[in-house]
Structure formats: C-alpha cells, structure tokens
Amino acid sequence: MGKGIRKYFPYLICVGLLLFVWPPHSYRSPEEKNPDGMTQAKCVIALGGYKSKAVSYSIGFNYEMLRRAADILRCDMEITLSANQRAVLDSLEAGVLDLAVLPFADSSLARHPGLQKCSIMADSTVWVTTEGRALSAASLNTSLSSLKYSQDYNNILERFSPSYEPYSRVASGRHFNNASPYDSILKEAAKELGWDWRMLASLVWQESRFRIESRSRRGAEGLLQLMEQTAIAYNGSAERLDPKENLRAGVNYLKKLQRMFREDAASEEELIRFTLAAFNAGEGRIKDCIKLAQSKGLPYSTWTELKAAIPFMRDSLTIDSLEIRTGVFKGVETIAHVEKTDSLYKAFCIIAP
C-alpha cells in the first residue's frame, strides 16, 4: 500500500462505513424505498352521465386502464365512483384524493390551474392528479405510454368501444370478435360454475348491460348486481366495482343456489332455470313455490311446471294455510327474468357460435 493511500486510509474506512450504514437515497431499490413494494393511492372515476363517441364503455375502459397502470407502477389503487365532479376536484386539491378521471372538456378543470393533467385518453377523458401526491402525472404518462404501445391495447379499445346490444347484433348479421367487454373472465367464471359462458353473459347483460357502474335502487352494484352483504358473504370482500371480484362473488352465490335445487330439477338445463329464478327472487321464494306445488300434488321438476304453481303463491289464504315463510309472491318479474335470460342466451349463441 503506497504512502498516499496509507495516509488517507482511516478516512476511507470511515466513509465506507458511513455509506454502508446510510446509503445514498438514489442507490436504493424501489423495494427499499417502500418496504412492501406498493404505493397506496385513492382514485375516483367521475364520469357520471358522460358519454364518449369513441368508447361506449368509458367507465369500464378507464377502470381497466387504471388497474393496468397500477400494476406497472406497483401501486395499490383504491378506485371508486362519483357523480359530483366539483367535489372530486376540491378533494384533489385538498390532498384527500391522489387521482381523478374526468371528461377532458369539463370546464371546471380550468378553475383548478394547480392540477396536473395526463395525456388525453381515447374516450376524451383525462386523468388528473396533484403535485407531490403518491401518483405524479409524469409516472402516469410513462405507464400510459407503455400500455398504449403494448400488444393488447388495440384489443382493450375494441372490447370497450362498440355497442353490445344482443338483439341488434343478431339482426345486423355481422361478425364480432367480442360478445362482451369481458369475454375472457366470463369464460373463466362460467367454467367454474359449469355453465356455457354465453348463459352467464346473458345473465350479466340482463343485470347490468355489461356496465360495472350499474347500480339498482336497492343498492345492488356491478356486473351481477350484488348487494354488499352478498359480496362479502361469497367473496370475503365488499369490492363490487371490480368485474373479476364481482363475478367471483356472483358465481360463488350461483353455485350455492345450484346445490340447493339440484335434487328438485329434472335436468342440468332445468337446474339453470331454477337457479336463475332463485337469483332473481331469492332461494326462499323458489323453495316455497316447490313446497306449495308439493302440497297440491303438482309436478315441479321443470321450470314450466313450477311456473304453473306460482299463481297459487298470490293467494294470501293459501299462503297462510301452508305457513309459507316468504309470504305472498306474485312472481311476474321472476318469470320474465328467466324467460328473458333464456331468450338472450339464444341471441348470444348466434353472436358467438
């Protein structure tokens, strides 16, 4: 070792130890910067009533793009919906939110010059964030660029762009690559259920028209219009906006209904109809219809037979005498629901042979 090196050797040791104990920030990996490898971010899609000419399913499209961007950024993104765009912008500025999806032409954006806008999306919406939050416009634009140049981006646009009205599609006689925006996850879910995936697609269309933002007056949400307690009971999560999670919870519930009526139905085809009826009216109602049919000596192993017993469920005297727990049941909506889903299934078989 030379004299010059020996002279400064004690200092080099000290510097080395200091770097070992306290490495420079720029040397740390993303995992070291964030031990769990994730960033928590709150996002709101505020497109209530917005209609895009380019993309028919803007909320579903943005939801999928946000999820994919979150994967690239290793970000745990909580996504909710809001119809109050002004409140969303105020929440962004106040630091309550990290990201919002808004119509690019929304005039209220101009009144918030401090917000950062990302590149305009294909449906003329824009992702908006604020400086210093968990998600920056620069990082989001980088992830969007990588997404837009990926192999399946055109497929994403194709899935969310057209109208999916089944009867119009049948009448057009045209060939379509997708029967829904969610063919792949519908096929996966239907396989677990043991159904033709087009039957499950028919039920989803009947419930939500393939719109993840669909919400009933009673508070049922998502592709299969699930109540919060149903989503928790059959998936362990209250998440209903996510199409995969919604379908998973719905399929688990449908599997339970199938087990309940398997001994009553004459065939797998009839079991599906019993399940559809129970999904609409509740399993208790359909079990009471079977109980009533049994008490009157009526056949009930097919939906056509059981449907013939429903008018007796409208008579309060009969209900009281048989101690029917669920009470009077008109059944008109449920009968229409099963018949409409059957009809839609035939249409989907033409659309996706």
Image (tube, rainbow, N blue to C red):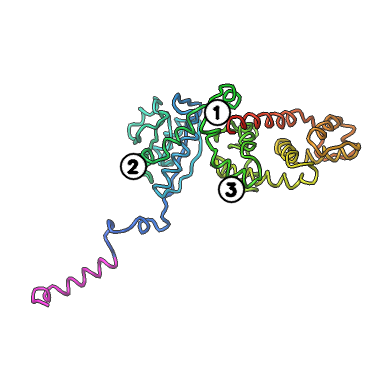
Decide if residue 189 is on the left or right side of residue 33: right
Q: Secondary structure at mark 2?
A: helix
Label 3 vs 1, first from the N-terminus: 1
Label 2 vs 3, first from the N-terminus: 2
Decide if residue 261 is on the left or right side of residue 196: right
Q: Secondary structure at mark 3?
A: loop
Question: Would you say the magenta stretch is mainly helix, strand or loop?
Answer: helix
Look at label 3 and name its amino acid. Answer: Ser
Mark 1, Cα crowd under 10 Å, few <14 / some 14-19 / many 20+, is many
Residue highlighted by disc 2: 142
Q: Nearer the viewer, mark 2 or mark 3?
A: 2
**Residue ID at (41%, 50%):** 74
Look at label 1 and name its amino acid. Answer: Tyr
Residue highlighted by disc 3: 237
The residue nearer to you, when weighing 223 against 95, is 223
- Whole-percent x and y of residue 89? 42, 33
C-alpha gap between disc 2 and disc 3? 31 Å
Residue 219 in view here: no
Magenta span of residues: 1-21
Q: Nearer the viewer, mark 3 or mark 1?
A: 1
Q: Secondary structure at mark 1?
A: loop
Residue highlighted by disc 1: 164
